[in-house]
Amino acid sequence: MRIELERRPDVSKLFSILSPFIALGLTIFFGGIMFVLLGKDPVSALYSFFIEPLTEVWSLHELAIKAAPLILIAVGLSVCYRSNNWNIGAEGQFIMGAIAGSILPVVFHEWHSPLVLPLMMVLGMLGGALFAGIPAFLKAHLNTNEILTSLMLVYVAQLFLDWLVRGPWRNPGGMNFPETRTFDASAILPEMIASGRAHWGFGFAILAAILVWFMMRYTLKGFEITVLGQSERAGRFAGFSSRKMIWFSMLLSGALAGLAGIAEVSGAIQQLRPVISPGYGFTAIIVAFLGRLNPLGIVVAGLVLALTYLGGEAVQVSLQISDKPIRVFQGLLLFFVLSCDTLIHYKIRMMWYDLTKTTGEGAR
Amino acid sequence: MKKLLLALATTAAVIGFSAAASAADKAKICFVYVGSKTDGGWTQAHDLGRQELEKALGDKIETQFLENVPEGPDAERAIERLARSGCGLIFTTSFGFMDATVKIAAKFPDVKFEHATGYKTGPNLATYNSRFYEGRYIQGQIAAKISKNGVAGYIASFPIPEVVMGINSFLIGARSVNPEFKLKVVWANTWFDPGKEADAAKALIDQGVDVLTQHTDTTAPMQVAAERGIKAFGQASDMIKAGPETQLTAIVDTWGPYYIKRTQALLDGKWETTSSWDGLKDGILTMAPYTNMPDDVKALAEATEAKIKSGELKPFTGPLKKQDGSEWLAAGASSDDGTLLGMNFYVEGVDDKLPQ
């Protein structure tokens, strides 16, 4: 017996809309069973997970902080993936953006001016874009596989940051601990509203999502991205250059990842440390697909994913359980959402014929 | 469909419903862990401390923890969540939680905070640490007695003062027995990575060391040492199971007594901010049983342990020279704690260049 996924001839509009809700229902059902088996009250678990983080002002701010880098990176990645360029190295571009943007507050720490902050953001975008330029160059001119090169460069960026904060950029007053000096007030991204610590990174994320959505929907560039992504050959007939598209999409996503990096460092961490990201660049890949590669969908997906982190902690505190079942629950949610989405486009077909016959044929 | 599922879930909920005992009158003591509470090393030691605390004062307090909290903005949120959920005293158990703890402590003046291994305090923020180096001095003496080649290997994590202090203390202990003793260091640049730690162990053994010690958290080096038939020391937890014929002793972190002491102070209304740095005599670290060594070495180790506990012996006591040959401590002079906590130099005899 063999199981195959077969593309559906047409996609049901109704189920495209219903699919996330079905997935949520399945998650709640199976997650509820898990909590019951653990001897915990599933209603209060689900309440803490999905609702409690949304009931308090401070945790809404935390939600925005957590979602901002995910959305910003994922929006850039959606352009890449739409155009069939598989940038897996956003984590590295995030880090390089953070490093480039931190040059001002760390190396030129005596310079205080209102110009510092905007310059930091620009440098951050440049840093991320240049770092994404490496796999772009390798793919455009040497036909290298960008999945491999961009992924490997993540480790380069991580180790470079590690070296910087332990070596040349180490805080002279920091007791030899691996971190840079803390940023001056003029280099810290301010809070959006006074009621909590959510900084302008979230504003950037929303702005980026709207701009990219507009580009994809209403401009020739957006059309070019879609066409080249679906069929490179067709794109060439239309006069689009796939080489230029590699550069465009990689640099754009690198710049957005870099901006996410410097916004996170300047707004939330306020210094460089050996580790500045709990894997935002990789989680953003999930966010991009969860949002069906649509910038506005990505905003929702980013918020949902951020909610699962906050909710996970809330459940740990309210139910006194370890974080393992929470991870399982997060996994359930992603599994059901992505598999429900897959089943919109594909149907499962069981192939009942005898496999021994096929091998026989193949051998002949 | 969705309604049906919800109904099913609710039914399941009713069946499995168990009312959570209300404990509003008990003081809540909370912990933030950087790793998993069953990591077999650093975090597990803290969690054992938490369990001990519950056992000792369980009728007056309840405990709560968050595990696998990444350092950085996530830590700030996790600590704030605990502060808001009614915790009276919060222990943040990783160096990387320092700035997050400082920020949240300033925001919640009525909650008490204690940060492990850091150096920033406040009116409601204390720090606590353990004089692990006292155990390393004993290990150094044992190593010098046991080693035939006169060279030990040290698997180090990161070049922070805590680790450099341990390396120096080990070598000072060893040189008190054998003034020619040498120490090779490999930086694994990780706290927890069995593969890297095992590689470091192999590299050191290939360079001729015949006693191994580590400042990383897994039992991998112990296993490599066992395979290659040399001796080794355990770290953070008793690792005798990983090397029944191999482990000489281990430094075991026992945070329980400290957690009980501080919680009792909170209950009595006597909690005050401090920078606590206890050692062997306070029971914040203990030595695992001295095994796989001749009786005279064991006697020496036990005698040294007793001397450190009584305060008769301080590991960092002159005459001591720095690695470059310059004078550090004159004969009879002991180092102050400030120098130790900011230590960024090797003492004479370390066969390594300190990463700067």
Image (cartoon, coloured by chain):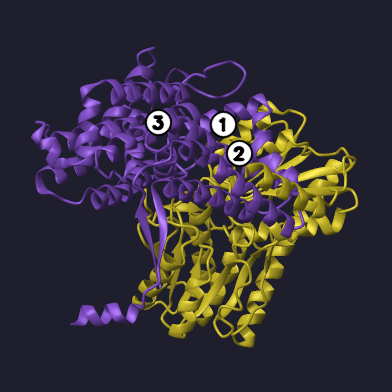
Task: Give the quarter of the image for residue A276.
Answer: top left
* Image hue for chain A: purple
Both on one chain, marks 3 and 2? yes
Q: Which residue is mark 1?
A: A63
Chain shaded yellow: B
Q: Which residue is mark 2?
A: A310
The numbered mark, 3 or 1, whose residue comes first in the sequence reads 1
Contact flag, marks 2 and 1 (Cβ < 8 Å): yes
x and y, in percent, of residue A235 in the image:
14, 36
x and y, in percent, of residue B151 in the image:
42, 75
Parent chain of label 3: A
Contact flag, marks 3 and 1 (Cβ < 8 Å): no
Does residue B266 appear to the left or right of A63 in the view shown? right
Parent chain of label 2: A
**Tag 1: amino acid:** Leu
x and y, in percent, of residue A320 in the image:
74, 50
Q: Is residue B345 above or below residue B288?
A: above
Per the image, label 3 sits on a secondary structure element best described as: helix
Per the image, label 1 sits on a secondary structure element best described as: helix
Does the image show residue A171? no
Cα distance in 3D space between marks 3 and 2: 19 Å
Residue at x-position 51% and y-position 48%? A334
Q: Which one is nearer the viewer's eye here, B313 or B104?
A: B104
Does the image show residue B351? yes
- Label for residue A72? 3
Q: Is disc 2 surrounded by few (<14), some (14 to 19) or many (20+) residues within 10 Å? A: many
Cα distance in 3D space between marks 2 and 1: 7 Å
Cα distance in 3D space between marks 3 and 1: 14 Å
Residue at x-position 59% and y-position 62%? B39
